[in-house]
Image (cartoon, coloured by chain):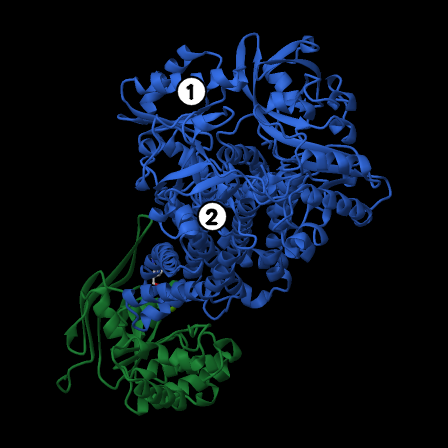
Amino acid sequence: MSGLLQDLQYAARQLRKSPGFATVAIVTLALGIGANTAIFSLLDQALLRSLPVKDVDRLVILKYSGSNIPGLLRCRTDGKFYFSYPMYRDLRDRNSVFSGLIATDWTQVGVQWHNQPDLVAAELVSGNYFDVLSLQPALGRLFAASDDLKADASPVVVLSFSYWQRRFGTDPGILNQSILVNGHPFTVVGVAPPGFHSVVLGDTPDVFVPMMMQAEVMPGSKDLDSHQSSWLNIVGKLKPGISREQAEAGVAPLWYALRSDELKSINTTGESEGFRDRFLTKSHLLVLDGARGFSPLRSDVQMPLLIVMGMVALVALMACANVGSLLLVRASGRIREMSVRYALGAKRRRVVQQLLVEGMLLGSAGGLLGMLLAPQVSSLLISMLWSGGTGDLPFSARPDLRIMLFNCSLALFASLLFSLAPAAQFWRPDLAPALKQQGTTARSGSLRFRRVSVAMQIGLSLTLLVGAGLFVRTLHNLRSLNAGFTTDHLVTFGIDPRMAGYEPVRTFALYRSVFETLSGLPGVRSVAATNDPELANDNESGNIAIAGYAEKSHEDMNVEQPNVSADYFATLQVPLLAGRAFTLQDSAESQKVAVVNESFARHFFGDPQQALGHLIGYGGATPKTDTAIVGVVKDSKHASLREPVTPTLFRPYVQLSQAQAMTFYVRTWQQPESAEGTIRRAMQTLDPNVVLDTFRTMNEQVDNNLIAERVIALLASGFGVLAALMAAVGLYGVLAYSTMQRTSEIGIRMALGATRASVVRMVLLEVLWLAGISIAVALPVSLLLMYAVRSQLYGISGSDPLTLCGMTVLVTLVALASAMLPARRAARVEPMAALRHE
Amino acid sequence: MIEAGQPLIQIQDLTKVFYTDEIETHALSGIHLSVNRGEYVAMSGPSGCGKSTLLSIIGLLDTPTAGRYSLNGKTVENLDFAERSRIRNQEIGFIFQSFNLIGDLTVYENVELPLTYRQRMPAADRKSRVMEALERVGMAHRIRHYPSQLSGGQQQRVAVARALGGKPSILLADEPTGNLDSRNGEAVMELLQNLHREGATICMVTHDPRFAKHAQREVHLFDGKVVAEEELRKLLQETSA
Ligand SMILES: Nc1ncnc2c1ncn2[C@@H]1O[C@H](COP(=O)(O)OP(=O)(O)O)[C@@H](O)[C@H]1O
Ligand SMILES: [Mg+2]
């Protein structure tokens, strides 16, 4: 590498000489690399990274196929199969293929320490949790099997490392101290190692509690003995040398035996042969790869992150193409310089080296700036995606060094590659014509390359803009979707008095005083509450039976079952279609009543009026049907705006056997934000130990419910605009250069009688050509991509003609706009240019 | 229509001054010149004496600083750009020293180019004009070639065809043989000679006395002025002395 230093100096001087070019190139690269690194870091953490535990490749997740147990008392309705505690215990104790099986569930608890209440995330874990994961404590000890032998017998907690830092200032003195969890004293026995969050990816519990303490940690649930409560995740560790397939085969007989027992234990009268088939013969225990942990989160964020990643990749591609064509412009302008260098005896290698050094300088400057940018982009994204969550963020904004290096070398590689493109052009220079070139008879191959690159950029920006358009309209559609209730002037917050140590009776009393106090506040129109909050991705469902209703074979009798206060429908402004709403006369002692929604009425009875008077029972195979339907309300969205309305059965919360956590809705006269202070103060005077959870307006709740859609729409628009800008810059570059190169050609045309208008037309036509070809290619590609992400769209088809046409027009306009300046410059060429020759 | 006897080009007291970086270059000062229909005029003089400048003003590529110029009986020194474009396109055929064919267009397209700038000329007419012009210069068999695939002499013949295609009132040639070897140069000169014989009006700049002899009349320029031949000789002797 002779003269490398000289080349470096010369390259730096060259870049300084054209600061505009250097700035555009470096900023483009930096944006590409920064965004890429940030997004890829998140993607890696969300989808790819392994749990930070030993023997991680032996971890497996258990799931099963086949029917769920009928008449479930408690079941999560997210479509995934969970296990009951007895099933977990039997699998754990009777299998021969796992060296350990752990059970886990997530919940929220109230922690009180030094009289300071705090709402934290808790993971309820089997006693062997830390053993199976081979984790060592940061302080004290972790759980042992002995902590998890008898119900309610071992009130101990392990703190997560970050909760220990955050709440207890890393004070080792917390060891063996007592803290209140939901009002019960628990002893802190240890702190989990740093860097470990949970076996469930995306969960960041602050405390770990033994499974046997479920009654204290999840007030109101007593699931440990019930086969009819499916609620647990099971993670296992394979015995050494046993593969997942072997484990699955080995555990199959046990699964069959356990399921047969379950089938016997439930009342099977009326269960057909088909059910037996689905419950037993066709049911299999599945042993899935668990190295990366369980991830409910993974499936939630996978699609949005993949979409964002795709957009970033497109933008990065554009950045490369852009820098590449920028380098080519400069190179083409320097053919003569290079020819002179050759003529003066420069060796090819030196000329190429010169170009490579310049490309490298650009690449590393862009890469450096991109690395500085990446953490900013990351934390911005994280804060957008996980706004309003409790506890730690499961993701860190610190970009991964490997990914950073990878992206940097990618940038360097790309810029080297592109600096080589002009080098290829100089490889076999036609010295004679280049030196005495008349400028007009030369046809330029580099121009063709740059046209391709610009066409590509126009196409990519069209693709991104189409995506942006569809996602923005999806967001708009979801936002303007009628939730079925009025979201304006509505404030919501949750409380769980049990976490402050309330007994059931006192809890009901507290709720009554909350209603009284809040209704009396100035500016409050009405107050209502539910145990199943709206638009919070929450479900409280269960099986029902209807007296005198002929169930179709295996008809899904699982319906949403919220328990609500008397003024619920009035407060949310859900219209009543038939019968009556709940009143204060509906009490624990009076006739059990229910109000159903329109979907429920239509599904089971065909018509709202027909539903009135029917009797309902819950769970089990032959339950007591003692609840009368007294009213029907119009449908409203429940878990999320996206999901369709499901049959719903409302009951008065006062008729619940156990008090539960409730979410309150306060309808205000004035702006809901202004009510916060008043409400908080009123609640404070009722009981300072009751913590208000997620206090927000309903419109904020809606926004929060649409977080993924909002992030995608925002990013897609951002990237779309960025892409259009880059395409415009690229197009401008190509045209500015090509018209400059064609100065004498344009002069000749003018000498031959071309008018200024016809020259402008000529340049614009060229642009339209380029744009037309790239649009013709990009449209089908966009259609395909949009088809791939159709699950993320709402109320709009991936081939929505309005969006496609609109964005095509937009891209064409951007192209024409960026062509205006070069076109006008071309039109100002003097015809005299034709006569001038050096 | 022009009355018989009236010159095609009439230039009176024409001046051209270039202003560059506060330097005034008097490229032409007080030129009187008239060229009759059907005439073949050669303009000669030492390099830098203003030949190209004069030719470009005649061809309406440039405007004079002062003086009068009428072409075909029409005063043209103060026309706007669009009007000058139109006249260039219809009345004037250019032949350049460096051929100035457009590299991205074929021979056919190059010759067709000026015709495409005319409004409402039917494609069939264009085609017959182009082929007629190419046949006239003997290049009709090369219509699909690109300029870079032709020799210099062939390129210049295509350039002549391009100038002829528009059926202009006058052909303007600026050192048409400057980039050609002598054999190809002779051929192009012969082509011009023949065109003249068929009635074309030609104004040609050359500094080669041999080629100047082809013309009917020779105009000598020196330092931006028209001078008589003997005077030029005297002036040249003075400067070389
Ligand atoms: N565009 C211009 N700007 C400034 N000076 C010019 C320009 N064109 C020509 N000249 C000057 O005018 C004079 C005449 O030039 P030109 O007509 O090209 O000479 P010739 O063709 O006879 O060699 C020269 O001194 C030349 O430098
Ligand atoms: Mg000249």
Q: Residues within 10 Å of mark 1 (few under 14, many from 20)?
A: many
Is disc 1 placed on a helix, strand or loop? helix
Left or right of A583 in this view: A344: right
Q: Nearer the viewer, residue A746 or A162?
A: A162
| Residue at the extreme right of the image, as rendered | A241
In this rendering, the label closer to the viewer, 2 or 1? 2
Mark number for residue A511? 1
For chain A, give the colour.
blue
Is A31 rendered above or below residue A131? Answer: below
Question: Going from the N terminus, do you reach mark 2 or mark 1 first?
Answer: 1
Q: Is residue B86 visible?
A: yes
Where ligand 1 lies, by quadrant? bottom left
Is A680 rendered above or below residue A442? Answer: above
- Label the green chain with its letter: B
Residue at 69% across, 17% down: A156
Is A149 rendered above or below residue A561? Answer: above
Left or right of A248 in this view: A572: left
Q: Position of residue A392 (x, y in %)?
A: 58, 26
The residue wearing badge 2 is A548
For badge 2, the amino acid type reads Gly
Tell me if label 2 and label 1 are in contact, CB under 8 Å: no
